[in-house]
């Protein structure tokens, strides 16, 4: 079991997110050591945009991948300069596009011809030229949960690979657009390197086709997606960045002068975050025992939304383990963190740790049932 400063937890209202910033620093150091030379790593803010984490990420020199005007502001407030910001998303508003142009971000990852047209118009009105990358949907199934698969023809994301040439030709007719790159993102929580190898093969083929048309591209952005170990966060507290980056270094054929970009979210922040809750009641059911805790799906939505499983520990007991259904206080049956979870014998008031919650935990929290948002403890 990881060590947590329980004495200090006594002073704070639960539930709250505890962040181990030392682990975050080590994780980023590993990224720097293993990323291919000359490549650029953007942090995907959607995973967690807490200012304390963002400022560590900014100081360590990572760029940002944003999907809204709000995220662009958060990135800039944390000290990430606009020239390191890329902006994705299928539904950018006119206001957001104008703001991003004004700030001088590095690149718009464009997801449709219709968006291309609007960016060109707005840039024209502002007498600017917008740097863009075309997000391509490469028809690769990343074999992850269907809600977080993005690279198949069923998904709303990107421009279908079969339409790429047509869209590039169109982009070249637009005066206030400059085509800088190709962008891909095939899904999240990917735990095998195979989908990434497939992605490299698709990119190599596309690059050949573009070369034959004498179209040059400055950079290739392969998105994010590297998974983490939710079952064993203490064994794999830092994801296997070496294998991930080596896969790209070995399989992708970059053209001279081209840079490779990544957009990593989960793998950067997931293991450094833990949701800390307290047991409110132990309830003896007919065939089961419930541990009702003061955190719910409003604080960590992943189990309810994706049937995701997070490791759960009782930090306050050394007694023999018993099976509990760990549930929250929200009026929804899906408000459950796990059934038949083995916890050291639990009592009212015990601290419960829900692990690997640094990514898509606090950033997806809501106030359903008029609840307060979870607090934060920076360790
Ligand atoms: N780039 C783009 C364009 C993305 O859409 C995403 C994530 C990323 C990068 C970062 O991917 P990562 O390295 O974190 O896998 N809420 C879900 C995950 C949604 C991911 C959305 N896109 C979850 O809790 O599992």
Image (cartoon, grey):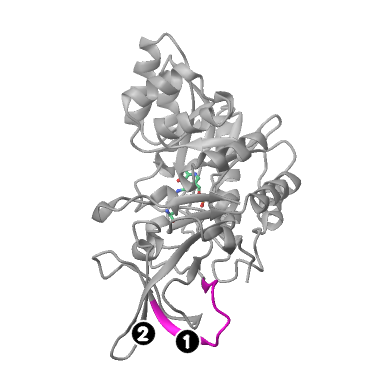
The residue lying toward the viewer, choosing from 53 and 114, is 53
Check disc 2: other Cα within 10 Å, few if <14, some if 14-19, many if 20+.
Answer: some
User: Mark 2 near ligand 1 (CB under 8 Å)?
Assistant: no
Q: Horizontal and vertical percent for residue 283?
A: 33, 81
Mark 2 touching mark 1, by CB under 8 A?
yes
Is 1 a magenta residue?
no
Crowding at mark 1 (Cα within 10 Å: few <14, some 14-19, many 20+): few
Q: How many marks?
A: 2
Please give the name of the residue rendered at 41% of the width and 43% of the height, measured from the top-left corner: 162
Is residue 300 something one can see in this rendering?
A: yes
With respect to residue 183, does 331 lie above or below? below
The CA distance from mark 2 to mark 1 is 9 Å
Residue lying farthest to the bottom in this orientation: 287
Residue in the picture at 45% in, 16% down: 102
- Tell me residue 83's x, y (percent): 58, 24
In the rendered image, the quadrant that contains the N terminus is: bottom right
Q: Which residue is drawn at the image coordinates 46% and 29% (left, top)?
A: 73
Looking at the picture, tell me which residue is in the foreground, 137 or 109. 109
* Image x and y of residue 296, in percent: 35, 62
Query: Considering the numbered disc 1 on the image, is that residue within a helix, a strand or a loop?
Result: strand
The residue nearer to you, when weighing 154 against 376, is: 376
Residue span colored magenta: 313-325
* Apparent side of residue 102 relative to residue 214 in the rendered image (left or right): left
Which residue is situated farthest in the front direction here? 11
- Residue 309 at x, y = what percent? 45, 69
Describe residue 370's horizontal placement relative to residue 241 as left or right.
left
Reading the image, the residue beneath label 1 is 322
């Amino acid at each position: 079991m990881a060590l947590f400063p329980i004495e200090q937890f006594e002073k704070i209202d639960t539930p709250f997110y505890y962040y181990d910033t030392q682990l975050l620093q080590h994780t980023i150091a590993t990224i720097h050591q293993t990323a291919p030379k000359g490549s650029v790593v953007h942090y995907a803010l959607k995973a967690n945009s807490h200012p304390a984490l963002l400022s560590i990420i900014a100081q360590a020199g990572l760029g940002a991948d944003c999907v809204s005007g709000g995220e662009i502001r958060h990135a800039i407030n944390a000290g990430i300069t606009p020239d390191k910001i890329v902006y994705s998303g299928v539904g950018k508003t006119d206001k957001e596009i104008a703001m991003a142009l004004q700030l001088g971000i590095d690149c718009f990852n464009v997801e449709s011809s219709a968006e291309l047209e609007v960016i060109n118009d707005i840039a024209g009105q502002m007498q600017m030229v917008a740097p863009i990358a075309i997000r391509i949907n490469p028809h690769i199934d990343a074999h992850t949960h269907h809600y977080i698969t993005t690279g198949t023809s069923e998904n709303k994301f990107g421009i279908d690979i079969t339409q790429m040439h047509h869209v590039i030709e169109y982009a070249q007719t637009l005066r206030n657009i400059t085509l800088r790159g190709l962008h891909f993102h095939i899904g999240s929580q990917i735990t095998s390197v195979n989908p990434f190898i497939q992605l490299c093969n698709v990119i190599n083929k596309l690059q050949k086709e573009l070369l034959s048309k004498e179209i040059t591209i400055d950079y290739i952005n392969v998105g994010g997606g590297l998974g983490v170990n939710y079952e064993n966060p203490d064994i794999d507290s830092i994801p296997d960045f070496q294998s991930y980056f080596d896969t790209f270094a070995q399989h992708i054929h970059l053209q001279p002068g081209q840079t490779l970009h990544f957009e990593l979210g989960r793998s950067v922040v997931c293991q450094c975050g833990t949701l800390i809750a307290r047991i409110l009641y132990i309830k003896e059911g007919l065939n089961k025992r419930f541990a009702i805790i003061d955190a719910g799906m409003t604080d960590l939505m992943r189990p309810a939304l994706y049937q995701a499983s997070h490791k759960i520990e009782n930090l306050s007991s050394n007694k023999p383990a018993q099976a509990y259904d760990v549930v929250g206080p929200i009026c929804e049956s899906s408000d459950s963190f796990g059934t038949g979870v083995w916890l050291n014998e639990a009592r009212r008031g015990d601290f419960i740790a829900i692990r690997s919650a640094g990514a898509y935990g606090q950033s997806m929290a809501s106030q359903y049932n008029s609840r307060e948002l979870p607090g934060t403890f920076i360790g």
